[in-house]
Amino acid sequence: MFKTVLFPIDQSREAREAADVVVNVVQKYGSRLVLLSVVEEPNAEAPSTDPMVSPEVVAKLLENAQVLFSQQGIQSEVLERQGKPAFTICDVADEIGADLIIMGCRGLGLTDEGATDSVTTRVINLSPCPVLIVP
């Protein structure tokens, strides 16, 4: 049913919690697992000084995730892309023929304004395949 699962990861607690669901789904369906980290394009007007988005940090994040899944007997592929997270996630899902995107939910509050700004909401609205959100 889910031949290819895309798991966009970042350093959030929600992404770490979603990893357990990814393990269960991938093992149950024998899915191909693709791990994706999206680094936002730097803004020329306000360059990022956030050390959390350095290439080294992203590479380490993907490596650690790959090790975590391999400990569960799951082989995974890793992709690192640059762009707007929601659009890039959906583009990659289309590119790899994903049957499911699993991602953590990062709450921005209960207002409509906050909900429309979340990456999760945008992925749900733009995705070429089903999206499983782990609260």
Image (cartoon, rainbow, N blue to C red):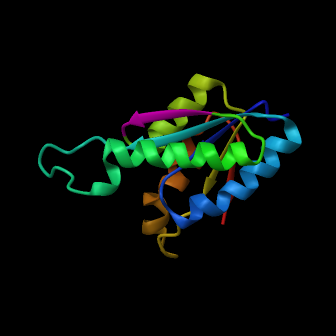
Q: Position of residue 66 (x, y in %)?
A: 61, 42
Residue found farthest to the left = 45
Residue found farthest to the bottom = 110
Name the quadrant of the C terminus: bottom right
**Magenta span:** 77-83
Q: Position of residue 40 (x, y in %)?
A: 34, 44
Q: Would you say residue 82 sits in the magenta stretch? A: yes
Q: Position of residue 115 (x, y in %)?
A: 49, 64
Residue 45 versus residue 32 in the image, above or below: below
Give the image quarter of residue 2: top right
The structure residue drawn at horizontal position 20% and vertical position 56%, both measured from the top left corner, is 49
- The count of marks equals 0
Q: Would you say residue 37 sits in the magenta stretch? A: no
State left or right for residue 68 relative to residue 74.
left
Kindly report the secondary structure that dominates the magenta region of the rendered protein: strand
The structure residue drawn at horizontal position 55% and vertical position 49%, both measured from the top left corner, is 64
- Is 68 in front, or is 99? 68
The structure residue drawn at horizontal position 45% and vertical position 46%, both measured from the top left corner, is 60
Q: Position of residue 83 (x, y in %)?
A: 36, 38
Name the quadrant of the N terminus: top right
State left or right for residue 20 relative to residue 79.
right
Give the image quarter of residue 93: top right
The structure residue drawn at horizontal position 75% and vertical position 39%, both measured from the top left corner, is 74
